[in-house]
């Protein structure tokens, strides 16, 4: 675990921790706490993780609990689900969620639906985790966001952390949850440091799945986002604050179940809603939020239609200039907010 | 009585012993088991034709010796997972005919409270009932991994058909099971047809017991309950002793088509079906063996038949009269041990609440 000393506040030392270390700490603590928990996936053991998220875990816990698999997503995901059937609590890592498509039948048909089909007889306490969404220069086959695909399915819980506190608290919650949880990380966030409170550093720090967090309160417009885009929203909010526009930034944390109440409460205060996501627009997270708002009490409080800021509706191109313009930039968010506010 | 066990071997120096002993009690028990399965499946056929059972219904009549023999060869504490032709295993793993038929008819008294249907019935150490061809095989290896991890000496029997034998995920599973020496017995129930496609038309190699390659395999007559039992014992011992996985091919036959919507005679002749029925029926084979060795009288067996008929009729009566699940059950058991979540109904005003299992 690497941390940098932050500023001194009174006698309190504020620790900074990178997202990957927060994830590592979460898994380490849960492996220690419950011997039924184990991690499997490609390169998770002796390589310390393709993105070093599982660094040190194999050395500490050994072959039985940190398992390197061959490149066989469908096979090892099925094995992980079977292990969950029979009393273990697997963490199944996909090197990226793009590879989960090889195994998606096991996630949906074997994991998500089983509790229901068995009328509650067979629980499936499993976590599927890995980096999701766009990275940098990895092109079309390695850049897809799967939030909408997985969040579509009943029986799953789908979680998308932004910062280190999210990462740790939500991953611990996911591991302790007796249901299949799809835990979507972001590769570009792994190396980003965030402040970690004392509370967040404790071994029992768990965040509730299904509750969003208001990262920044504001009165003029509600921004709803998840994962990396939360940071972009905060950056856009900082710029707009100088112009007297106060944005309320909501970090969804959970895509399914989604904290609709939090969004509605905010919209009823600000009267304007902009959703921001890295994924494609059609049938996406923002589309779902629009539908939810229309069906609920907050609709009557809208002074303008909901605006969605999304990735461009194309396979991800490679060239940097094209890639940069395929995902929402801060200027796109600012532009969309101003259009929504008609300023 | 003693009987001769015949096995083809792959990657094994020795197979099960040449002969096996059948005691009277065992014989009666296997007879009762297979006959119950037979009558249960035929009752399901009847109920389906009466439109009291709907959707998918894949019947097992003809294959009874496989389910009965496997159960006789393993411990209660071992684990079993199979595909969709699962009613027999649901029974051998301890679920009553009543609860099985009531699940087929979609009633609240069904083993899955009407939530699962034919392909999704579960019991302790029995993981269904799986609808996606081949998916159950990696799941089975995962259950075996859990056995190994927990050091409980248990094994998992993961069954699949000749059709599923060509699924890629099986080969991924063989690789990992062998690599990690998982205590998993892979069982191919080769009934010669994957839906309407005969094995010759589907597989470049129909030696399914060899398809595990580096995994040792054996092939036995799946119509002989004793052969199945002995092969299963041998396979289970192999796994339990830490040698890793093993593959067992059972040569068997289904009298019905693939499912109730398949008459089963467009891709095979009625003569072929009749031939198996008259010369190779698993229940007849056992019956003849017991009668010719004076292990039971014809009257005794007839009495058992009568008891079974009554049991199945009573079960069918229950299955047709038990009420359907209440609408409140719609949102039950989406999750386990979870706070309630709001579930959207068919329209925005239909706000349902989930109730989790615990």
Image (tube, helix red, strand yellow):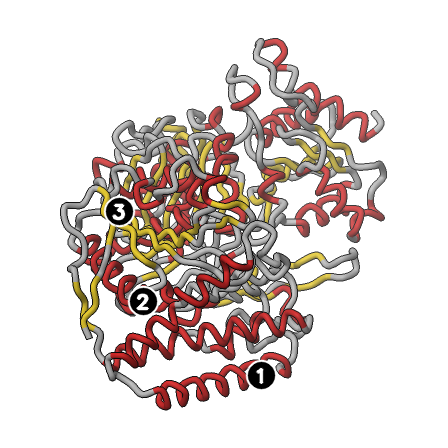
Q: Where residue B209 appears, x then y in whole percent?
A: 31, 46
Task: Check disc 3 and report the residue beneath it.
Answer: B217
Specify whether residue B123 is in view.
yes
Residues indicated by labels 1 and 2 sit on the same polypeptide chain: yes
Q: How far across and how far down the image is residue B121, in percent? A: 49, 65
Please name whichever residue, B71 or B136, is drawn nearer the observer in this view of the structure: B71
In the figure, B233 relative to B184: above or below?
Answer: below
- Look at discs 2 and 3 and give the one toward the viewer: 2
The secondary element bearing badge 1 is classed as: helix
Q: Chain of mark 1?
A: B
What secondary structure is found at the residue carrying circle 3?
A: strand
In the displayed structure image, the side of residue B106 where residue A334 appears, left or right: right
Which of the two labelled residues, at mark 2 and mark 3, occupies the earlier sequence position? 3
Residue underneath mark 1: B318
Picture coordinates of residue A31, whole percent (x, y): 30, 47
Q: Which mark is residue A336?
A: none
Q: Residue at x 33, y 32 (%)?
A: A70
**Quick one: A236 or B274, which is closer to the camera?**
B274
Q: Horizontally, is B304 left or right of A300 in the view? A: left
Residue B225 image label: 2
Marks 1, 2: nearer the viewer = 2
Q: Residue at x 28, y 40 (%)?
A: A66
């Amino acid at each position: 675990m690497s941390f940098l000393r932050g500023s001194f506040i009174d006698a309190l030392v504020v620790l900074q921790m990178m997202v990957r270390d927060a994830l590592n700490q979460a898994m380490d603590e849960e492996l220690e706490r419950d011997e039924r928990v184990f991690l499997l996936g490609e390169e998770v053991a002796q390589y310390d993780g393709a993105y070093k998220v599982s660094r040190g875990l194999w050395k500490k816990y050994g072959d039985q609990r940190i398992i390197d698999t061959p490149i066989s997503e469908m096979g090892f995901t099925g094995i992980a689900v079977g292990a969950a059937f029979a009393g273990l609590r697997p963490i199944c890592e996909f090197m990226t969620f793009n590879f989960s498509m090889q195994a998606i039948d096991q996630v949906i048909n074997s994991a998500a639906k089983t509790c229901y089909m068995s009328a509650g007889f067979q629980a499936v306490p499993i976590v599927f985790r890995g980096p999701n969404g766009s990275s940098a220069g990895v092109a079309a086959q390695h850049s897809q966001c799967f939030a909408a695909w997985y969040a579509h399915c009943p029986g799953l819980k789908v979680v998308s952390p932004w910062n280190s506190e999210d990462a740790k608290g939500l991953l611990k919650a996911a591991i302790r949850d007796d249901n299949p949880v799809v835990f979507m990380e972001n590769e570009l966030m792994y190396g980003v440091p965030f402040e970690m409170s004392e509370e967040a550093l404790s071994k029992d720090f768990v965040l509730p799945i299904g509750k969003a967090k208001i990262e920044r309160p504001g009165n003029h417009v509600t921004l709803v986002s998840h994962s990396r885009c939360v940071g972009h929203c905060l950056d856009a909010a900082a710029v707009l604050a100088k112009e007297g526009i106060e944005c309320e930034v909501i970090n969804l944390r959970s895509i399914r179940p989604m904290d609709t109440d939090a969004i509605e409460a905010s919209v009823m205060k600000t009267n304007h809603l902009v959703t921001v996501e890295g994924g494609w627009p059609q049938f996406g997270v923002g589309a779902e939020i629009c539908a939810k708002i229309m069906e609920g009490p907050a609709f009557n409080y809208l002074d303008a239609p909901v605006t969605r800021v999304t990735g461009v509706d194309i396979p991800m191109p490679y060239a940097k200039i094209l890639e940069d313009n395929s995902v929402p930039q801060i200027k796109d968010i600012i532009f969309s907010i101003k259009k929504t506010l008609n300023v | 009585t003693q009987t001769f066990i015949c096995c083809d071997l792959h990657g094994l120096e020795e197979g099960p012993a040449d002969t096996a002993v059948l005691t009277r009690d065992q014989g009666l028990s296997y007879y009762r088991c297979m006959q119950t399965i037979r009558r249960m499946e035929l009752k399901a056929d009847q109920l389906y034709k009466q439109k009291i059972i709907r959707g998918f219904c894949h019947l097992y009549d003809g294959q009874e010796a496989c389910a009965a023999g496997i159960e006789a060869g393993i411990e209660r504490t071992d684990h079993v997972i199979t595909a969709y032709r699962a009613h027999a295993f649901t029974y051998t793993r301890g679920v009553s005919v009543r609860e099985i038929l009531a699940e087929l008819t979609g009633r609240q008294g069904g083993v899955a409270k009407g939530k699962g249907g034919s392909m999704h019935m579960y019991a302790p150490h029995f993981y269904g009932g799986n609808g996606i061809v081949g998916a159950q095989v990696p799941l089975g290896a995962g259950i075996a991994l859990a056995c190994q991890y927990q050091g409980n000496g248990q094994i998992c029997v993961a069954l699949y058909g000749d059709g599923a034998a060509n699924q890629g995920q099986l080969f991924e599973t063989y690789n990992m099971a062998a690599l990690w020496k998982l205590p998993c017995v892979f069982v191919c129930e080769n009934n010669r047809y994957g839906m309407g496609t005969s094995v010759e038309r589907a597989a470049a190699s129909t030696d399914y017991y060899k398809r595990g390659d580096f995994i040792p395999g054996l092939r036995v007559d799946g119509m002989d309950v004793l052969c199945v039992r002995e092969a299963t014992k041998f396979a289970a011992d192999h796994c339990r002793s830490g040698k890793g996985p093993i593959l067992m091919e059972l040569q068997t036959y289904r009298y019905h088509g693939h499912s109730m919507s398949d008459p089963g005679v467009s891709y095979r002749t009625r003569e072929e079906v009749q031939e198996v029925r008259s010369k190779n029926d698993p229940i007849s084979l056992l019956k003849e063996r017991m009668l010719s060795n004076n292990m039971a009288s014809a009257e005794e067996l007839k009495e058992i038949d009568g008891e079974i008929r009554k049991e199945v009729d009573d079960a069918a009566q229950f299955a047709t009269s038990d009420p359907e699940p209440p609408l409140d059950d719609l949102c039950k058991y989406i999750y386990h041990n979870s706070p309630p979540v709001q579930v959207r109904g068919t329209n925005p005003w239909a706000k349902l609440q989930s109730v989790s299992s615990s």
